Image: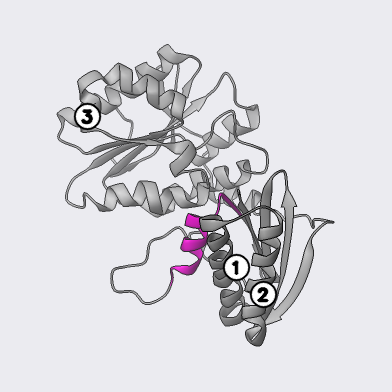
Amino acid sequence: MTTLTDEPFLHPALFYRDEQEYLHGTVPFIRDGLKAGEPVAVAVPGPNLAVLRTALGEDAADVRLLDMSEAGRNPGRIIPKVLRAFADAHPRTRVRIIGEPVWAGRSSVEYPACAQHEALINPAFQGRDVTILCPYDAGRLDEQVLTDAYATHPLVISDGQEQHSTAYAPEQVVARYNEPLEHAETAEELVFDAERLPGARHFAVERAERFGLSGLRLENVALVVAELTTNSVLHGGGSGTLRVWADDGQMVCEVRDGGYLKDPLAGRRPPAPGQLGGRGLMLVHYLADLVRIHTAPGGTAIRCYITP
């Protein structure tokens, strides 16, 4: 794939409208990488993964293939667990990745986290020898999604033509989707401080059992709540409010406190080797099916969705 920039990090969006355009934009990208000796990973939704595996034939064995609907169900874990995990495993060579985090089945609750993820790829990989190609189904996705793609990708490929995006403004996308989270009327609430941390965890687990969670998912609730409430005590003013409720078959846990997350990559930037701390929010992203965050100087709300 030819490009219009000599920057080490490339982040183009690929607009496609049918299977032929999808394969035309992705298969040569993969094979060019393999021919150049570059490690290649593909993380796309299951149906597209099957199409690519068939089209690649024997070459598929040389590509790291991931179902994005599983690996990236929570958009907040895609950078550390999918993109950085692959790039960091090959520190001495350029790598190519296809990542498709937005598909027609994504809900309106999930989408703001997807848009922020796409915007945050840019600062997360600035200066790295990495190309991350992001396909967008232009025939099925909402117009706002495509508009956001122009803002989160410095390069856009459409109708086989690659061009610079004049609308590129990833910081604006991060800010726009840092939206207040509406209160749920059915939520049960507990105010906690350092002495009530065990009680907060018990409060959430008890209700998770009532909502039908068990086994590993119940343990995930306990860990998520423990990490978030401990962060509130240590970094959010010493106390906070825990709310839990059921929504469309999922358990929702939300923690609000007086802290402020100044770094938009908090929880998405893997800690350096040997670094003490800095893993709590990333663990929350790994365990939850969706994490929505609203943060401002006056306080922060972190909302986690966990499916039974």
The answer to whether residue 168 of the structure is visible from this angle is yes
The disc placed on residue 265 is none
Secondary element under disc 2, as helix, strand or loop, is helix
Residue that protrudes farthest toward the right in the picture = 185
The reply to whether callout 1 and callout 2 are in contact (CB within 8 Å) is yes
- Residue sitting at x 55%, y 54%: 288
Residues packed near mark 2 inside 10 Å, few (<14), some (14 to 19) or many (20 plus): many
Q: Residue at x 67, y 53 (%)?
A: 251
Q: CA distance from mark 3 to mark 1?
A: 40 Å
- How many numbered marks are there? 3
Residue 7 at what x, y percent from top left? 30, 43
- Numbered badge on residue 61: 3
- Element type at marker 3? helix
Could you tell me the amino acid type at mark 2?
A: Ala
Residue 199 sits in quarter = bottom right
- Residue 225's tag is 1
**Left or right side of 44 for 36:** left
